[in-house]
Amino acid sequence: MNFSTSEENYIKAIYHLQRDDGMVNTNELAAELKTKAASVTDMLKKLKSKKLLHYERYKGFKLSIDGKKLALAIVRKHRLWEYFLVHKLEFGWDEVHEIAEQLEHIDSKSLVEKLDAYLQHPKFDPHGDPIPDVNGKMEMTRQINLIDLELNRMAEVCAVGSQSSELLELLRHRNIQIGSRIEVKRKFSFDHSLEIKLKNEAPFTVSQQLAQTLFVKPV
Amino acid sequence: MNFSTSEENYIKAIYHLQRDDGMVNTNELAAELKTKAASVTDMLKKLKSKKLLHYERYKGFKLSIDGKKLALAIVRKHRLWEYFLVHKLEFGWDEVHEIAEQLEHIDSKSLVEKLDAYLQHPKFDPHGDPIPDVNGKMEMTRQINLIDLELNRMAEVCAVGSQSSELLELLRHRNIQIGSRIEVKRKFSFDHSLEIKLKNEAPFTVSQQLAQTLFVKPV
DNA sequence: ACTTATTTTTAGGCCTGCCTAAACTTTAAT
DNA sequence: ATTAAAGTTTAGGCAGGCCTAAAAATAAGT
């Protein structure tokens, strides 16, 4: 089966809206896609006929198994490309969304798999969102970027956004590892650096750049 | 100005057809694009109104200055992506065309420039075609891939497809440099390796991988 | 329960890019 | 020069994806 960019955008948007497996409604989706409710209804019929969603008029809708599979494939591509753009092409993590929105619709199984291998199978994108694997499975750890952790909230380091040897060297030097207990004591708005404290250690300062590659799970 | 994928495909096809700055005609273009003459006429009107080409009904057409600029930008993207796919993702050079056809329509100036820098500003794509620079200039040496050189045909090495230090090390060891006189003595179909001979030296064997990065000009 | 407000769907239209069939130009042949 | 052939354009239509306006279904308020 083959899908248009537009169809894929609908599927992805529905996926993001139905967070907890609940129903999605027409206006909500129209707002998300910046389009009109009537257009949404048109597309819902098409997607239903392609068996990508369960839908009855006036009753709301949700993705079918196949729809979810497609959504995960698109999310996978999106997040792999974001990872590529940030870690290989050196884009800022705030510049990549638009471009990834285009790249995610490139249609080639082997491209995705080769890209994944080239990036060494990253588990999280530069925003800390998990990247689904080829079967659609992903880490479900609800994690946030260190930079977004509230002050004095104890958290556990659970992922790093990159595997580069430079980063790993720095982390080793700072004695930061997966599982470390960490707190943010201050945030400096001038350069977005953070003063952090590891359990049983003295506080020290880390750069914005470093903080952005660290993902934590509040405990 | 903003262009659709379809418009870009027309511009690119016209560019390839009008090799020597001559006129292109409708049927020719229809054949190239696997579409019908009537559809071509429709599009010609649109492209003329966008000032991308010079066109008078029944008289043929050719790209305008702006059209040529756009064509070169698309060719640039296509060939950079092909280079990326072959040299970074390890696709075979015969597998990449389709994918590059999609990637060439991704719209982001900064993406192209960052990709170009990441690849270290390659001058030739994996097929030996020159990659236009950001201003549309490119090497005009008519060159072919070493792998396509006929047996016992003397040629001069005129370009390498990559600047990687690994490649340069190997070339130095083999005493191959720009300007070297070279002949292919045998081709082994099993692994596509070649037996080659440099002027005044003994023949030796090179891998497919190496041969694909070498471009020569028959003399 | 009944009326009003909200949500959703239908109906009909627009634009892009494609198509076929018919009309028109240009070119080639006698 | 006239006619035939080849090439090109117009006319009219279709599908995808969007729109507005109006109708229908559901939800909410009293």
Image: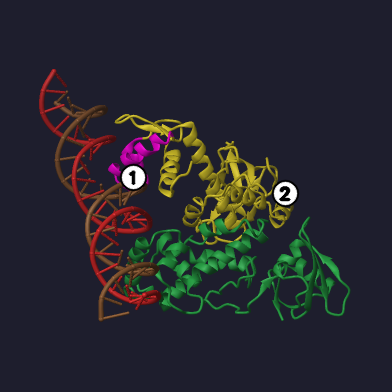
Chain colours: A yellow, B green, C red, D brown
Residue A35 magenta-highlighted: yes
Residue B26 magenta-highlighted: no
- Chain letter for mark 2: A
- Chain letter for mark 1: A
Using the rendered image of the protein, determine whether residue B11 is visible from the camera's viewpoint.
Answer: yes
Element type at mark 2: loop
Determine which residue is flagged by label 2: A175
Residue type of the residue flagged with mark 2: Asn
Ranked by sequence position, the earlier of labels 2 and 1 is 1
Q: Which picture quadrant has residue B153?
A: bottom right
Which numbered disc covers residue A31? 1
Discs 2 and 1 share one subunit: yes
Magenta stretch: dominant SS?
A: helix
Q: In this view, does D15 lie to the left or right of A63?
A: left
Q: Which residue is at a point 36% across and 61% down the rendered structure image?
A: B39
Q: Which of B21 and A201 is in front in this view?
A: B21
Q: Which of B56 and A140 is in front in this view?
A: B56
The stretch of residues the image draws in magenta is A25-51
Q: In which quarter of the image is the N terminus of chain B?
A: bottom left
